[in-house]
């Protein structure tokens, strides 16, 4: 399936939750499949922290440009583009095509940098609704998202309940725990204390705070994996280094390791260290530091129950959609307990809810991987939606 990026410009101001507004902004998006005559088969996909509008397919002439949820979306896949018209939208503030900190502020003629306004999950949903209006889509067959994308899917059912028939919320939560906020803050501090950060205006200085970005990604990546997966992949394996004896030391022999390996506090010794540094290096080459700060803050701020004294049942009362929620047993960042909180609140409101808790070893990243049970659950649910459209 060949994907084609598209762009839609919005000259009018979008009012934001912070009280600020943004005008003359652009949203990048992609569509897959065909919109039916009734315009009733549209599925909106909301992306997580470091993803984009490129949800599925590949770009023409680029074999390695597979969309981030390509195992989920496409012809004959769980979200079948032979039956559904799928839309992926890049959020405001991102660094993958939509207007963000790297773009020019029309008010000043300067790059936004640190002056880009604070955005929230609710702001993203509002911007997505504007794009759907332009596409002539009044009501979605479904809104689908994992992690931060799941928060957006949930917010859709509260902000525009009449526009959503089904909501699929995967590996998500009604808000972040204090521990999650703490991880995000440590990652942000790594970025803002990088000497190349320059108060968020590093573009003017021709530098990028890569050191901070690397550390932020390493911290995040640890939280996306389970302990079981890290032990299985890496264990305590040492990375081959400069050997004094000329031969690799046999595993499990500490005396030989100490004698034959060249040790240094600066060097990478364990395989897991090498892996994390690789992930950090790769991330710092393509992601924007200000975008990282914006998106993690949006994660932190999301809490629909806050306006209702912490009562999630009351907060979810406006939702009228049918729901599918999916969680994963080893996901300790967005644990099954958090999904069950949403399920309970919806059931308290007598809403239609399907819930699947998948016993998977992969941690939070499981929502992106090929697990037959997980993909089967989502596929069966979308089969149900397709039958409603027939």
Image (tube, rainbow, N blue to C red):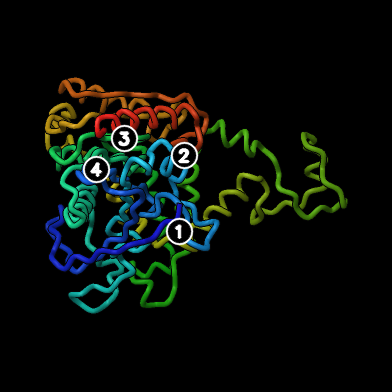
| Mark in front: 4 vs 1 | 4
- The quarter of the image holding the C terminus is top left
Q: Name the residue under label 1.
A: 213
Give the alpha-carbon distance from disc 3 to disc 4, as whole Å: 15 Å
Q: Name the residue under label 2.
A: 365
Q: Residue at x 18, y 64 (%)?
A: 22
Give the alpha-carbon distance from disc 4 to disc 1, as whole Å: 23 Å
Instruction: From this view, report whether residue 161 is shown above or below residue 6.
Output: above
Q: Does 199 sit left or right of 14 as displayed?
A: right
Q: Which element type, helix, strand or loop, lies under badge 3?
A: strand
Q: Is residue 240 visible?
A: yes
Q: Which element type, helix, strand or loop, lies under badge 2?
A: helix
Give the alpha-carbon distance from disc 3 to disc 1, as whole Å: 28 Å
Give the alpha-carbon distance from disc 3 to disc 2, as whole Å: 15 Å
Q: Residue at x 52, y 55 (%)?
A: 280
Q: Which of marks 2 and 4 is nearer the N terminus?
A: 4
Q: Mark 3 points at which residue?
A: 169
């Amino acid at each position: 399936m060949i994907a084609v990026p598209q762009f839609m410009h919005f000259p009018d101001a979008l009012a934001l939750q912070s009280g600020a507004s943004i005008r003359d902004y652009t949203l990048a998006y992609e569509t897959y499949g065909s919109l039916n005559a009734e315009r009733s088969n549209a599925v909106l996909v909301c992306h997580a922290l470091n993803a984009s509008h490129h949800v599925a397919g590949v770009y023409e002439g680029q074999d390695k440009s597979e969309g981030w949820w390509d195992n989920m979306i496409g012809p004959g896949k769980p979200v079948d583009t032979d039956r559904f018209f799928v839309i992926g939208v890049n959020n405001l503030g991102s660094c993958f095509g939509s207007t963000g900190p790297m773009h020019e502020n029309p008010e000043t003629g300067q790059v936004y940098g640190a002056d880009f306004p604070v955005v929230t999950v609710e702001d993203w949903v509002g911007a997505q609704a504007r794009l759907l209006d332009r596409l002539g889509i009044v009501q979605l067959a479904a809104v689908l998202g994992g992690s931060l994308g799941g928060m957006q899917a949930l917010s859709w059912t509260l902000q525009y309940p009449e526009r959503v028939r089904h909501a699929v919320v995967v590996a998500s939560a009604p808000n972040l725990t204090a521990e999650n906020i703490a991880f995000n803050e440590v990652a942000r501090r790594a970025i803002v204390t990088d000497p190349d950060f320059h108060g968020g205006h590093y573009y003017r200085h021709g530098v990028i705070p890569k050191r901070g970005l690397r550390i932020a990604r390493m911290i995040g990546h640890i939280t996306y994996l389970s302990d079981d997966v890290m032990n299985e992949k890496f264990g305590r394996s040492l990375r081959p280094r400069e050997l004094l004896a000329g031969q690799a030391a046999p595993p499990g022999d500490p005396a030989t390791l100490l004698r034959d390996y060249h040790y240094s506090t600066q060097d990478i010794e364990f395989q897991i260290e090498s892996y994390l540094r690789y992930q950090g290096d790769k991330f710092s080459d393509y992601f924007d530091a200000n975008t990282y700060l914006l998106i993690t803050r949006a994660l932190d701020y999301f809490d629909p129950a806050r306006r209702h004294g912490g009562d999630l049942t009351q907060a979810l009362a406006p939702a009228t959609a049918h729901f599918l929620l999916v969680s994963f047993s080893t996901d300790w960042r967005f644990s099954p307990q958090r999904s069950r909180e949403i399920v309970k609140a919806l059931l308290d409101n007598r809403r239609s809810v399907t819930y699947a808790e998948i016993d998977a070893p992969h941690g939070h990243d499981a929502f992106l991987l090929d697990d037959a049970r997980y993909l089967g659950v989502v596929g069966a649910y979308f089969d149900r939606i397709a039958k409603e459209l027939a």
